Image (tube, rainbow, N blue to C red):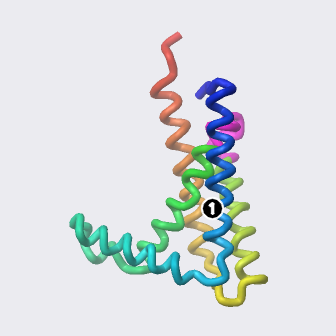
Amino acid sequence: MNTSGRHRWVFVIALAAYSAALAVVLLAPTSGRQSEAASWLGEVGTWVGVPERFLTQSRVEFVCNALILMPVSALGSLVWPRAGWRGWTAYTFLISCTVELTQGLLLPDRTVATADVVANTLGGLGGALVVGIGSRLVRPAS
C-alpha cells in the first residue's frame, strides 16, 4: 500500500502511541487487570452466543494475546511495507520474547508463558496479512 508522506506520519504516530500504551500493559507489575479484561471479553462472547467450550479463560486469554499485537504489525506494515508479512511476524516474535523475558526476570508477580509468545506471533502475522491483503484489494488498476 503506497501511503503519502502525510498519511505515513499519522501511522507512525499511531504506532508510537499504541506501542507506548502496550508497554504499560505488558510490563505492568501484575496481570490482574489483563485477566479481568479477558474475563469480561469471555462474558461478551457468552452474551453474543459463542459456545461456552470456546470461552475458557485460557482460550480467551490466548485470543487476547493474539489481538494485542495485531495493531503493531498492521501499523508497522503501513509505515514500513518492505518488511512484509514474514518480517513483521519475526518482529512480533522478537517483541513477544523480549516481553516474556522481561516479565520473567524483572517482574516477579508475572508469569512467563510460551503460549503467549505463540499467540502474540500469530497476532503479528494476522496484522501484517490484513494489511497485505487489504493493499492488494485496494491497489488501483494499472
Mark 1 is on which residue type?
Ala
**Which stretch did the figure color magenta?**
76-87
Left or right? Give the position of 58 relative to 13: left
Residue 38: x and y in percent read 44, 74
Q: Quadrant of the N terminus?
A: top right
Residue found 75% across the figure and 68% down from its top: 98
Tell me the SS state at disc 1.
helix
User: Residue reaching furthest right?
Assistant: 105
Residue found 29% across the figure and 77% down from its top: 53
Left or right? Give the position of 13 relative to 69: right
Front residue of 26/116: it is: 26
Front residue of 15/88: it is: 15
Residue 73: x and y in percent read 61, 49
**How many numbered marks have been drawn onto this rendered protein structure?**
1
Residue found 63% across the figure and 37% down from its top: 10
Whether residue 74 is situated above or below residue 59 in the rendered picture = above
- Return the residue at label 1: 21
Whether residue 137 is situated above or below residue 52 in the rendered picture = above
Whether residue 109 is situated above or below residue 127 in the rendered picture = below
Residue found 55% across the figure and 58% down from its top: 122
Determine if the magenta segment contains residue 17. Answer: no
User: Residue reaching furthest top?
Assistant: 142
Left or right? Give the position of 90 relative to 131: right
For the stretch drawn in magenta, the main secondary structure is: helix
Residue 46: x and y in percent read 26, 72
Whether residue 67 is situated above or below residue 83 in the rendered picture = below
Q: Residues within 10 Å of mark 1 (few under 14, many from 20)?
A: few
Residue 71: x and y in percent read 56, 51
Front residue of 29/121: it is: 29
